[in-house]
Image (cartoon, rainbow, N blue to C red):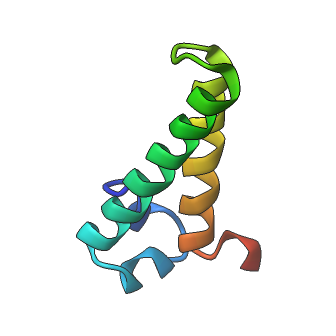
Amino acid sequence: MALVGPSLPGGAALKYSFWMRAGILVLVGVVALGAGLWGFGRDGKMASYGLLLVAVATVQWLMVGGWRR
């Protein structure tokens, strides 16, 4: 996602460096998978991976300013 962000329409992702975007997305992914592990008691549930997808995609959308379109 950090590599794809600048190619999305709007270019707002360019106000963050690659390492900042990657760090934010990794942190959000770890928190999402940790929440899935805590909630289900074990890793590997498809809901945990769904949460990971939604969380990272939402943060990427926020970083590129998707609500402004």
Closer to us: 54 or 1: 54
User: In screen coordinates, is 43 left or right of 68?
Assistant: left
Residue 33 vs 14, above or below: the answer is above
Question: Which residue: 57% across, 27% down?
Answer: 37
Residue 13 location, quadrant: bottom left
Question: Which residue: 62% across, 69% down?
Answer: 62
On the image, the x and y values in percent for residue 18 come to 26, 69
On the image, the x and y values in percent for residue 15 come to 39, 86
Residue 3 location, quadrant: bottom left
Q: Residue furthest bottom?
A: 15
On the image, the x and y values in percent for residue 31 come to 52, 48
Question: Which residue: 35% across, 57% down?
Answer: 2
User: In screen coordinates, is 21 left or right of 34?
Assistant: left
The total of numbered circles placed on residues is: 0
Question: Which residue: 62% across, 19% down?
Answer: 41
User: In screen coordinates, is 16 left or right of 19?
Assistant: right
On the image, the x and y values in percent for residue 21 come to 37, 67
Closer to us: 59 or 34: 34
Residue 18 vs 2, above or below: the answer is below
The quadrant of the rendering that contains the C terminus is: bottom right
Residue 51 location, quadrant: top right
